[in-house]
């Protein structure tokens, strides 16, 4: 077997013209079944692989999209959210015969260089950005370069295409639920506030307090980074301010908070209620089930990649902006079931 064969070689072996081989390789119509099978048999026997770079020069399409996650590698692959969303994007892309090129930001790399590496690699048709970050230089550079892109989360560019979940509403539901349970001092473990998702969840926290006639106490707000360790450290700070409930802006931080509460000699939910956000598959250090805000992560990824594919096909009206609903899942850590 010789994988170095070109179209002319395949044509000679199959006894057809080069253009016929090209039509078969690119799955074009107007080729008889017998001829198609003859060519495909030669292709299989000789393990022929088309030159994708050459094909891209002709068709102006690579059938490749870039997925950019502007986070540190360690954080990305620890957080179950990204595992679910990457898988959902990959599955839908494969259904449409697209490959996915993954770019994961490294906290040690200068942001401008990260953007240069992405834009310097032109072997993709469009870009899916998996998190909307404040002052992200990548988005205006993608727009200036003419690359179609879709963002998960609302970016600062008003005319950008994005898919998001209702983060504000989700946080409102969580905090309002704790207020209805009679909790008086509700702490917030926020996500990184350079992420719009984290800002929106903090906004929902504030709005729920205001609707109940309460002012935001800055001592009860601690910023985390969506890791379990940051939730643990943030909860230790909040416990010094005598909170009786904690709303953590993702499930990993909620689990870290529960560990801190128990180490402090307190009980969840009798002493401190806990609610998370995401409803991702996590391993809890205790047997108690986590109350959380469920966001449709799988649907979020599929909707985002489908929007990008439709954008590339020219079938999507822009700006395309979608906000998916969320749901409060009441389990044991909030205390409602014991009531």
Image: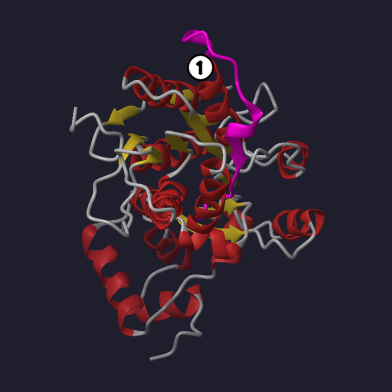
Left or right, 230 with respect to 291, comes to: right
Residue at left offset 59%, top offset 15%: 215
Q: Is residue 100 above or below residue 21?
A: above
Tell me the crowding category of disc 1: few under 14, some 14 to 19, or many 20 or more residues within 10 angstroms, Cα based: some
List the single residue furthest toward the bottom: 1
Q: How is the image coloured?
A: secondary structure
Closest to the observer, 297 or 49 = 297
Is residue 240 something that shows in the picture? Answer: yes
Q: Is residue 222 magenta?
A: yes
Q: What residue is pinned by disc 1?
A: 209
Residue at left offset 61%, top offset 50%: 60
Q: Is residue 70 above or below residue 212?
A: below
Q: Is residue 120 above or below residue 4?
A: above
x, y percentage for residue 127?
59, 46
Closest to the observer, 80 or 311 = 80
Is residue 166 something that shows in the picture? Answer: no
Number of numbered markers: 1
Residue at left offset 73%, top offset 45%: 138
Question: Secondary structure under badge 1?
Answer: helix
List the single residue furthest toward the left: 338
Which quadrant would the N terminus be assigned to in this image? Answer: bottom left
Which quadrant would the C terminus be assigned to in this image? Answer: top left
Left or right, 216 with respect to 107, comes to: left
x, y percentage for residue 322?
47, 24
Q: Is residue 132 magenta?
A: no
Closest to the observer, 54 or 337 = 337
Q: Which residues are magenta?
A: 210-227
x, y percentage for residue 79?
46, 56
Rendered image quadrant of residue 298: top left
Closest to the observer, 84 or 97 = 84
């Amino acid at each position: 077997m010789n994988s170095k064969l070109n179209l002319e070689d395949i044509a000679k072996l199959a006894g057809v013209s080069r253009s016929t081989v090209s039509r078969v390789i690119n799955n074009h119509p107007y080729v008889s079944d017998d001829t198609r099978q003859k060519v495909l048999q030669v292709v299989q026997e000789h393990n022929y692989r088309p030159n994708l770079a050459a094909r891209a020069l002709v068709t102006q399409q690579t059938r490749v999209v870039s997925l950019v996650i502007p986070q540190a590698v360690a954080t990305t692959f620890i957080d179950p959210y990204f595992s679910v969303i990457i898988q959902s994007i990959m599955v839908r892309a494969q259904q449409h015969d697209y490959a996915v090129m993954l770019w994961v930001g490294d906290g040690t790399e200068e942001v401008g260089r990260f953007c240069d590496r992405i834009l310097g690699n032109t072997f993709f048709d469009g870009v899916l950005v998996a998190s909307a970050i404040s002052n992200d230089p990548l988005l205006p550079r993608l727009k200036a370069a003419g690359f179609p892109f879709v963002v998960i989360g609302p970016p600062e560019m008003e005319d950008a295409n994005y898919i998001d979940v209702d983060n504000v509403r989700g946080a409102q539901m969580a905090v309002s639920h704790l207020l209805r349970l009679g909790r008086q001092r509700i702490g917030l473990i926020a996500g990184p506030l350079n992420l719009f998702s984290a800002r929106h969840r903090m906004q929902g926290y504030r709005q729920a307090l205001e609707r109940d006639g309460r002012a935001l106490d800055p001592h009860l707000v601690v910023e985390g980074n969506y890791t379990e360790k940051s939730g643990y450290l943030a909860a230790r700070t909040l416990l010094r301010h005598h909170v009786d409930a904690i709303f953590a802006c993702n499930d990993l931080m909620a689990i870290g908070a529960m560990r801190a509460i128990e180490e402090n000699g307190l009980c969840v939910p009798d002493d401190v209620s806990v609610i998370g956000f995401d409803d991702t598959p996590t391993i809890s250090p205790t047997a108690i089930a986590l109350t959380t805000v469920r966001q449709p992560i799988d649907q979020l990824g599929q909707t985002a990649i489908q929007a990008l594919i439709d954008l590339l096909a020219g079938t999507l009206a822009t700006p395309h902006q979608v906000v998916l609903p969320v749901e409060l899942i009441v389990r044991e850590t909030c205390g409602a079931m014991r009531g």
